[in-house]
Image: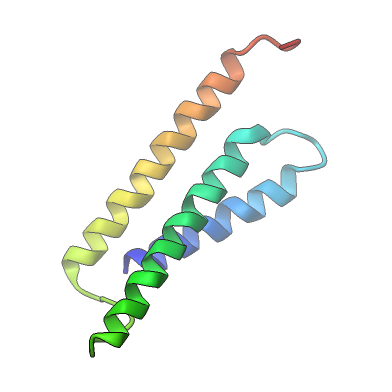
C-alpha cells in the first residue's frame, strides 16, 4: 500500500508542477515534493522486487503497510508545507 500511496502522491505533485510551471506559481516546493515522492516510489518498487525474488508478492496490502504509506504521505505533505512557507517568506528579489 505504501507504494500505491506514494505513486498517487508523486503523480499528483507532478501534475501540479506541470500545471503551474509556466506561471511559476508552484515554485521549487512543488518540484521538490514531486521528486521526494518519486524517490520514495522508486525505493518501494525496489523493495517490491526484492519481495518477489524472496517468493512473496510485489504489493503488501496489509494494514501496517497502509499505515506506513499514510505516514510517508503525511511526512511528504508536511515537508512540502514547510518548503512552501519558507518560499513565501523569502524576499522577492532574492
Height in image: 91 above or below 18? above
Give the farthest residue toward the bottom. Answer: 55
Reply above or below: 43 against 88: below
Would you place residue 53 above or below residue 40 in this image?
below
Measuring 67% from the left and 36% from the top, which residue is drawn there? 26
Question: Is residue 59 toward the left or the right of residue 85 in the image?
Answer: left
The residue at the point 56 percent across, 41 percent down is 32
Q: Measuring 47% from the left and 31% from the top, which residue is drawn there?
A: 81
Residue 16 is left or right of residue 50, and the answer is right
User: Which residue is drawn at the image coordinates 31% and 78% (left, top)?
Assistant: 50
Q: Classify residue 59 as left or right of residue 35.
A: left
Quadrant hosting residue 28: top right
Residue extending farthest to the right is 22
Q: x and y percent of residue 6 in the render?
A: 43, 60
**Residue 53, position as x, y percentages in the image:** 30, 86
Residue 30 coordinates in the image, percent (x, y):
60, 40
Amino acid at each position: 500500500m505504501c507504494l500505491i500511496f506514494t505513486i498517487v502522491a508523486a503523480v499528483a505533485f507532478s501534475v501540479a508542477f506541470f500545471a503551474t510551471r509556466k506561471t511559476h506559481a508552484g515554485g521549487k516546493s512543488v518540484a521538490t515534493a514531486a521528486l521526494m515522492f518519486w524517490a520514495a516510489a522508486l525505493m518501494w518498487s525496489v523493495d517490491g522486487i526484492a519481495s518477489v525474488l524472496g517468493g512473496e508478492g510485489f504489493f503488501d496490502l496489509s494494514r501496517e503497510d497502509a499505515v506506513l504509506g499514510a505516514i510517508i504521505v503525511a511526512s511528504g505533505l508536511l515537508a512540502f508545507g514547510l518548503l512552501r512557507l519558507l518560499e513565501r517568506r523569502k524576499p522577492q528579489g532574492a
